[in-house]
Image (cartoon, rainbow, N blue to C red):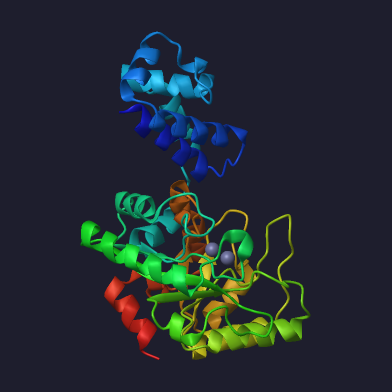
Amino acid sequence: MTPVAALERVVHCLDRAHETSFKTKAFVRALDVVRALPPDEIDKRAATHTLTELDGIGDSSARVIEEAYAGEATYLAELEARTRVPITAAGQVYRDALRGDLHMHTRWSDGGATIEAMARTAIEQGHDYIVITDHSPRLTVAHGLDAERLRQQLADIAVLNERLAPFRILTGIEVDILEDGTLDHPDDVLAELDVVIASVHSKLRMPAPQMTERMVRAVANPHVDVLGHCTGRMIAKRDPSQFDPDYVFAACAQFRTAVEINCRPERLDPPRPLLAMAIEHGCHFTIDTDAHATGQLEWLPKGCDRAAETGVPIERVLNSWSADDLLRWGTAR
Ligand SMILES: [Zn+2]
Ligand SMILES: [Zn+2]
């Protein structure tokens, strides 16, 4: 294993453990330093144990690099074991059925990895396809994509698709649901994309009647395929938004907008009682990581376990379908 590959794997493991600490930042920094230096300098310094003299290489990074050269990756092996994402036997049935992931972010908005890095990780995980869903312009803190940057992204994806075939990168967006239920891109822009996820990211505390109307209007838009993290809750930090789930899930079923089961550990949205209601209403679902880094693409087990616990019918999970069936569903409205 090369020092770069070893450090990349360390960062991947820390990301999947959701360790956004100083330690993760230190490894990302070390990775930048190693990438920027000629390999023979790294060779020489590893042999003479002088890596830590370099600005940005600490004791742990130096250990990972030296172990990579020695072919005895103890630090990494321990980290691999400690950060493995657990899954129940019942959840594994869902995980085995999944063929793709419909919600993720890249460096184009607020993600940490390139589209290619996300795609290559997804391939390693056995996926047939992914959907790239960066943020829309209203989310300025996340460098949301306006129509022009979105079209540049589509051109990049087309080039990558030629290189990575038969794996497929589908195009998409996580579009903001504005306060009145309209969306943060006009219909003609959304029509160019394979998959549109609509999510509420602002004014999460509006009164329930208005929030219900806002969400129903978005769900009814013919371009919207998925309702993202419907309550907007952040576990132990932010309460779920209030809305009438009967109206919202009935609209999801009627307008064929899937309800997302968001796998992010701080979201796990919708909460179980709402998920049970969505099943009753006959909704379709997606189980998505909402990954912002390659390691986070390993979070599907968290949503699979919930789907198993609440008895989501697997055949109603869109990302258990082939990419072609998924695309047909999106247009058959
Ligand atoms: Zn979101
Ligand atoms: Zn997202």
Q: Quadrant of ligand 1?
A: bottom right
Q: Is residue 139 left or right of residue 95?
A: right
- Is residue 76 in view from this perspective? yes
- Which residue is more in the foreground, 146 or 240? 146
Quarter of the image with the N terminus is top left
Q: Residue at x 63, y 82 (%)?
A: 215
Answer above or below: position of 151 versus 116.
Answer: below
Q: Residue at x 45, y 46 (%)?
A: 295
Q: Residue at x 35, y 49 (%)?
A: 121
Answer above or below: position of 299 versus 21.
Answer: below
| Most distant residue in the top direction | 48
Q: Residue 209 location, x and y as percent?
A: 75, 86
| Most distant residue in the front direction | 148
Quarter of the image with the C terminus is bottom left
Q: Residue 265 location, x and y as percent?
A: 58, 53
Q: Residue at x 53, y 79 (%)?
A: 185
